[in-house]
């Protein structure tokens, strides 16, 4: 069957199963809800549920606490024995009792069916080359028996890692992951359950750490991890929400520091501009004072020459006296010249006094504190390094809301369950280079095909060889079949 036909068939199959899944959506009177931890804006609760309760992993759920508390939504991460692990968007407090759970399994099927239908309707928006290689595995031709061929060597687009020994299988996956990280590939890693995702992620983190790669910045666990620690490594630091919360908290801190730098620069700029203008005014007045004093010195020199001439006048030879008189410098005119020069000096000194008074006014206005100039130069250098004031204004004006899509696109390896990938709208807007599907035969075929539609280059499927043996197909078409059949028969 062609890929688009298979996508449409799986979409219709999920839509049909939606009605049966609706039978699972009943009111569940639960016991104590105990908070296990908080990651970013998400909270993890352990909730007691009655025996015989059916909850499907990754299905949406609403928790209605007692009293006047507002209900909150979340997702089922695990249902084991009498306990359900639920991830919620809002906190219910440290502990509550007599809660009511309302599961919405039908929505999970509806979202998955819509995703497959969207891929089939808009194949140009997806890179379906690798998914086409996966289609024969999920829907083999009747009577076809090529298990031996399918478990053979690796291919460029579809790589198989089959081994009954999980450690040997994961070791191979670890080697492939190291190679992919070094080649700067974006990897989506999936496994059937959240427990399996946590264990595989912990193993890959340990492998990357042993090779010297910065696993904490490369790996990201979508949703809250159900296991606190794997392979001696705490998974809390690898959580997508925790990483995003820390990143944007740091970003906001840097933004706050940038705003302080920008505001201080804007504060100092007009001050120094004002003082620069006053300094220019001061320089002009000082230059005027210098010119006035130069003129005063010139007139004082002329008066000194006149005094010397008058003192020596009686001893001058007759021919020098006649020469002075010829140019109008006799005793009477020399005295008149001296009086005129003295008046000019008086006038110039008044102007000098005015200039000096202005200098005294301008000096404190033009003075720059000793520490202000180095501070301004340092701020100016930082502003220039960041691209100038216009660029900084754009950065400061950027929205404060966290961009989950941009953050996910910066992660090299994202680990999640196929149910969350195919039902979360965020994954419709991101693409990956490589898919690693661990325990792939136990992933529902519609979910695995929907996840494969996000892959551009290569798919790596891994699992236990014993799960490949069967008479009809190699994949379980629905991992929820047993649960739905129990509800339908009841």
Image (cartoon, rainbow, N blue to C red):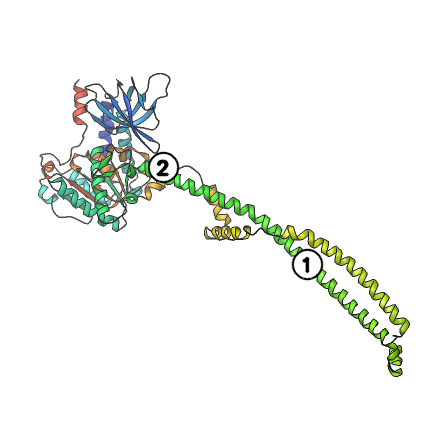
Q: What whole-number distance in Å separates the C-alpha atoms at marks 2 and 1?
A: 58 Å
Q: Residue 293, image x and y in percent?
A: 74, 63
The quarter in which the C terminus is drawn is: top left
Q: Secondary structure at mark 1?
A: helix
The quarter in which the N terminus is drawn is: top left
* Residue hosting label 1: 284
Q: Secondary structure at mark 2?
A: helix
* Residue hosting label 2: 245
Label 1 Cα neighbours within 10 Å, binned few <14 / some 14-19 / many ≥20: some
Instruction: Specify whether 219 is left or right of 392.
Output: left
Which one is nearer the viewer's eye here, 92 or 61? Answer: 92
**Residue extending furthest right?**
332
Which one is nearer the viewer's eye here, 358 or 392? Answer: 358
Q: Is residue 82 visible?
A: yes
Instruction: Specify whether 220 is left or right of 400.
Output: left
Instruction: Report which quarter residue 426 is drawn in.
Output: top left
Residue that appears at 83% across and 62% down: 343
Q: Residue 201, image x and y in percent?
A: 23, 39
Which one is nearer the viewer's eye here, 159 or 129? Answer: 159
Residue that appears at 34% across and 34% down: 40
Instruction: Report which quarter residue 215 is drawn in.
Output: top left
> Is 215 above or below relative to 42?
below
């Amino acid at each position: 069957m062609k890929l688009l036909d298979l996508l449409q068939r799986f979409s219709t199959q999920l839509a049909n199963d939606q009605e049966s899944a609706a039978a699972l959506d009943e009111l569940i009177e639960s016991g104590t809800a105990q908070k296990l931890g908080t990651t970013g804006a998400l909270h993890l609760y352990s909730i007691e549920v009655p025996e015989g309760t059916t909850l499907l992993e990754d299905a949406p759920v609403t928790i209605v606490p007692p009293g006047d508390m507002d209900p909150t939504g979340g997702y089922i991460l695990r249902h084991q024995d009498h306990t359900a692990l639920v991830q919620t968007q809002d906190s219910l407090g440290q502990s509550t009792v007599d809660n009511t759970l309302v599961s919405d399994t039908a929505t999970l099927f509806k979202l998955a069916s819509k995703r497959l239908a969207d891929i089939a309707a808009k194949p140009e928006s997806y890179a379906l080359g690798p998914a086409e290689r996966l289609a024969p595995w999920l829907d083999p031709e009747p009577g076809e028996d090529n298990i031996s061929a399918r478990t053979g060597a690796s291919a460029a687009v579809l790589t198989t890692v089959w081994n009954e020994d999980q450690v040997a299988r994961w070791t191979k996956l670890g080697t492939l992951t190291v190679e992919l990280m070094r080649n700067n590939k974006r990897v989506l890693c999936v496994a059937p359950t959240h427990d399996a995702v946590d264990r595989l992620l912990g193993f890959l983190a340990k492998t990357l750490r042993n090779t010297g790669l910065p696993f904490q910045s490369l790996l990201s666990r979508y949703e809250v991890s159900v296991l606190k620690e794997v392979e001696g490594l705490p998974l809390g630091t690898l959580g997508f929400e925790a990483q995003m919360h820390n990143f944007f908290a740091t970003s906001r801190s840097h933004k706050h520091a940038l705003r302080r730098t920008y505001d201080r620069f804007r504060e100092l700029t007009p001050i120094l501009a004002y003082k620069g203008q006053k300094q220019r005014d001061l320089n002009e007045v000082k230059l005027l004072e210098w010119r006035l004093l130069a003129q005063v010195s010139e007139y004082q020199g002329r008066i000194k020459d006149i005094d010397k001439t008058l003192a020596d006048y009686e001893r001058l030879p007759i021919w020098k006296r006649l020469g002075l008189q010829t140019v109008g410098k006799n005793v009477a005119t020399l005295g008149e010249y001296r009086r005129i020069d003295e008046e000019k000096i008086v006038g110039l000194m008044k102007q000098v006094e005015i200039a000096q008074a202005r200098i005294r006014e301008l000096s404190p206005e033009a003075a720059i504190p000793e520490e202000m100039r180095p501070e301004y130069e340092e701020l100016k250098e930082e502003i220039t390094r960041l691209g100038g004031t216009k660029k900084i204004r754009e950065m400061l004006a950027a929205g404060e809301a966290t961009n989950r899509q941009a953050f996910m696109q910066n992660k090299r390896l994202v680990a999640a369950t196929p149910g969350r990938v195919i039902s979360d709208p965020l994954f419709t807007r991101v693409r990956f280079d490589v898919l690693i599907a661990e325990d792939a035969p136990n992933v529902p075929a519609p979910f695995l095909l929907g996840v494969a539609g996000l892959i551009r280059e290569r798919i790596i499927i891994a699992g236990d060889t014993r799960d490949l043996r069967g008479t009809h197909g190699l994949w379980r078409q629905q991992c929820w079949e047993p649960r739905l059949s129990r509800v339908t028969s009841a």
